[in-house]
Amino acid sequence: MSARAVGRAVRLALAAILGIIWACGVPTVAQAYAIILESSPAAGTAGPAPKRLVLRFNSRLEKALCSVQLVGPRQRSIALMHLEPDAPPDTLAYPLPPALPPGDYQARWKVMAADGHVTEGAVAFTVAAS
């Protein structure tokens, strides 16, 4: 075998080994971060004042290290009641104050997945006048 053929075989072997190491060591997004799957009220919807705020993610959460802030019309922060303790491990649920006034709202969330990765985002919805 020529020196050129040996060099090419070595480079191919190294590339294959590095590819296997990379594939085994790089986590996918689904494994690494809590991604919101659904909310109630649903993002972008308008309707009557909801009684609860529910955010469901694709992985178990460290609930003690998660936070949700509800911001209403004129950027006023609205205090959320206690986190519902019986919600599933991938879900944050809060009872809302009765009769939220009409306007635009954002539920701004920051969560830590069980694997330690932190993600944040917001769900916007509108409370329509009755």
Image (cartoon, grey):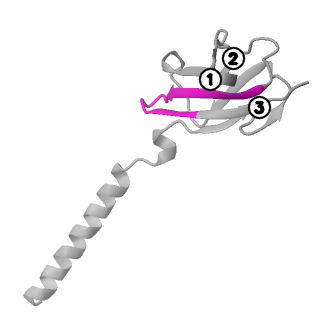
Up-down relation of residue 40 to residue 51 (above or below): below
* Residue placed furthest toward the right: 130
Residue drawn 41% across and 47% down? 27
Residue wearing tag 3: 126
The part of the chain drawn in magenta is 103-121
Give the quarter of the image for residue 88.
top right
Nearer-the-camera pick, 110 or 29 = 110
Q: Is 29 left, or right, of 72 in this rendering? A: left
Foreground pick, 90 / 111: 111
In the image, residue 57 lies at what x, y percent? 61, 34
To which residue does mark 1 refer? 75
Q: Residue furthest bottom?
A: 2
Q: Earlier in the sequence, mark 3 or mark 2?
A: 2
| Amino acid tagged 1 | Gln
Q: Which of labels 3 and 2 is toward the front?
A: 3
Residue at figure coordinates x 10%, y 90% from the top left? 2
Q: Residues within 10 Å of mark 1 (few under 14, many from 20)?
A: few
* Image spot of residue 38 (x, y percent): 69, 37
* Whether residue 20 is visible: yes
Q: Are marks 3 and 2 in contact (CB under 8 Å)?
A: no
Magenta region includes residue 109 = yes
Sooner in the amino-acid sequence: mark 1 or mark 3: 1
> Going 59% across and 37% down the picture, which residue do you hit?
58
**In front: 120, or 38?**
120
Q: Disc 2 marks which amino acid?
A: Tyr
- Looking at numbered disc 3 in the image, what kind of residue is underneath it? Thr
Label 2 or label 1, whichever lies nearer to me, is 1
Counting from the top left corner in percent of width and height, residue 103 is at 76, 27
